[in-house]
Image: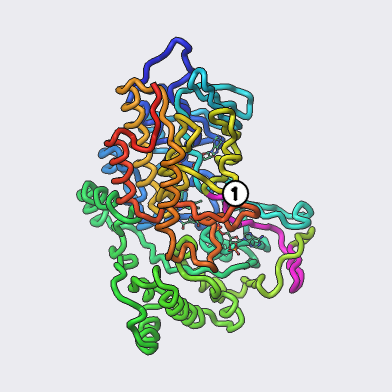
Amino acid sequence: MAQKTSDSPDTDVIVVGAGFAGMYALHKFRGLGLRTQVLEAGNDVGGTWYWNRYPGARCDVPSVEYSYSFDKDLEQEWDWTEIMAAQPEILEYANHVADRFDLRKDIQFQTRVDSAVFDENSNRWTVVTDSGQTYTARFCVMATGCLSVPNTPRIDGQDNFAGSVYHTGNWPEGGVDFSDAAVGIIGTGSSGIQSIPVIAEQAKHLTVFQRTPNYTMPAANAPLKAEFLRQAKENYAAIRAEQRASQVGIVGYGFGFGGAENVVPTQEIKQTTPAERQRLVEEEGFLAIRRYADVALDEEANELACEMYRDQVERVIKDPATAQALMPRDYPMGCKRPVIDTNYYETFNRDNVTLVDLRQGGIEEITEAGVRTAQGDYAFDVLVYATGFDAMTGALGKIDIRGRENRALTEYWEAGPRTYLGLQIAGFPNLFTVTGPGSPSVLSNMIVSIEQHIDWIARCILDLDQRGAQTIEATTEAEDEWIAHVNDVAQNTMFTAKSCNSWYLGANITGKPRIFMPYVGGVGVYREKCDEVARNGYQGFELSA
Ligand code: FAD
Ligand code: NAP
């Protein structure tokens, strides 16, 4: 256990953020006897699921897998109702966990951390909040989220709009009443694709502004059957073991139980004939593409899959011009975060939905009445930005983080994020990032990755105390080697294809360096690497007495 020293820091650990990462961190560290203070900008727990309350928001990982594994009783007592849970249910789960483990007493809400500065004399972090409160702690754990800073693009005239404006990533707690409203929505990423069908059902009219058409697969979500839930609960130990050893932290448990089948891609699309591909897409629709393993690795194979995809769009969309506009071209399938949907394409067959293909003339300005594009003006009462996030580095960049010699993290990361294992940064002792750049993070079921990181950090803190070490810090050499490895494994995948512009690469934020941020090596391989590093006396880290 960390010893209380004579200069008595306020706490042993400051955790910033009370999403799933911060909540588990608090529970875990508390269990080790560490005095832990969590600081959270929002009014309550849940992070992503607290902020993203837009209509249609839901998880795309099977519910039984997108849940904590750290407490066997918790696993047994919580009943998920759908194969993939909707936002209200996930938020309810977060609240249940907070109540059950009495987390709120150590979380200060409505508190934004503005700065975190390391003092080399005392080896302590000083954290200052937006109300000017100061905390000191030996360790600082940044559980600030990878998708927690909404991105609202700068568009001329946007303050002139007379109606209401919302961002999917910062949705009002009481919801939005769209009945009788004409709505405009900008963005067709995951959030847009989830919300568009639901808003279209509620609103008088919906105008969708699409810059880049996406690839999306039908979710085939369904209620969870009691028998399935019973089986899942019985098998939880095996499910968790498999998740931890897997590529993305998902076993597929839940698929095949009334929902979409869990298909493991084993065939090669390049070995098929055009007639076979056409037959398959006719029989199985978009989902036919899932059977091919080479689509993720080979650009030629990928293009064949994209052709199948466009064929299916043409089949589903009634209006030929709208179908053309909805067809993704010019970039490979799998370069961006996969999207799954419920009734997305069918929505564009509705009479009250208009698609504006911005490739035919982009947004020029936002006016008092709506959006002016090179193709004409569109008027509405409510404007929704579904324009994503400053991902992975955004939240850290908003905090003035200073390590040794008062060096700013933003300066150290000017050319792109540098970490060792996505857990630590050279020159920033005792500061940990959770699911940081350089770890599987957003390429995985994030609860699996969150638990792995928090468990690793907890073990590390215990080990430091056992060795009598005050600080731990990644070395620059270990960081260099890890970054080279992260870049290496991302090469020759669709993620880094020349034509790919994704938020994984920072391409959605003007001026952000183009660096592929997450680690593609897989959750299982990565876990082994982290464990090996710890076993070998924290290889690549410097421990100071
Ligand atoms: P978050 O949940 O983002 O929590 C971070 C918290 O830190 C926030 O509450 C924020 O307010 C707080 N914070 C940030 N900066 C500060 C500061 N300076 N001071 C104080 N507080 C601060 N992942 C999956 O694996 N599967 C999914 O299906 C999935 N669906 C998603 C759907 C949406 C709409 C979004 C946006 C993300 C989704 N994700 C999904 C990713 C999701 O972010 C993670 O699964 C997970 O919830 C992240 O938890 P977290 O605690 O790391 O971060
Ligand atoms: P996103 O994927 O980054 O999509 C943003 C959309 O906004 C894109 O279509 C983008 O177009 C568009 N856009 C941005 N700026 C624009 C501008 N100036 N003019 C016109 N269009 C503009 O963001 P997101 O949809 O919020 O999703 C972010 C991530 O959150 C996801 O990838 C996923 O990890 C997570 N998420 C998951 C789920 C889920 O199903 N579980 C749901 C929601 C979110 P371009 O493509 O042309 O840039």
Locate the C terminus by quadrant.
top left
Could you tell me residue 221's position as x and y percent?
Answer: 38, 63
User: Label 1 amino acid?
Assistant: Pro
Could you tell me residue 219's position as x and y percent?
Answer: 41, 65
Q: Is residue 20 visible?
A: no
Residue 282 location, quadrant: bottom left
* In this view, 214 is above or below 151: below
What span is colored magenta in the figure?
371-391
Q: Where ligand 2 lies, by image quadrant?
A: bottom right
Q: Say left or right for 187 vs 67.
A: right
Residue 209 location, quadrant: bottom right
Report if the beta carbon of the residue with label 1 is closer than 8 angstroms to ligand 2. no
Locate the N terminus by quadrant.
top left
Q: Residue at x 56, y 43 (%)?
A: 413
Q: Residue at x 41, y 29 (%)?
A: 472
* In this view, 342 is above or below 32: below
Q: Nearer the viewer, residue 193 or 529?
A: 529
Answer whether residue 376 is magenta in the image.
yes
Crowding around mark 1 (Cα neighbors within 10 Å: few <14, some 14 to 19, many 20+) is many
Q: Residue at x 47, y 30 (%)?
A: 429
Answer whether residue 275 is magenta in the image.
no
Q: Is residue 518 visible?
A: yes
Q: Residue at x 41, y 47 (%)?
A: 482
Q: Say left or right for 543 vs 257.
A: right
Could you tell me residue 207's position as x and y percent?
Answer: 65, 67
Q: Say left or right for 440 vs 255.
A: right
Instruction: Kindly state the secondary structure of the residue where label 1 is placed.
Output: loop
| Residue bearing the label numbered 1 | 150
- Spot the residue most to the top: 6
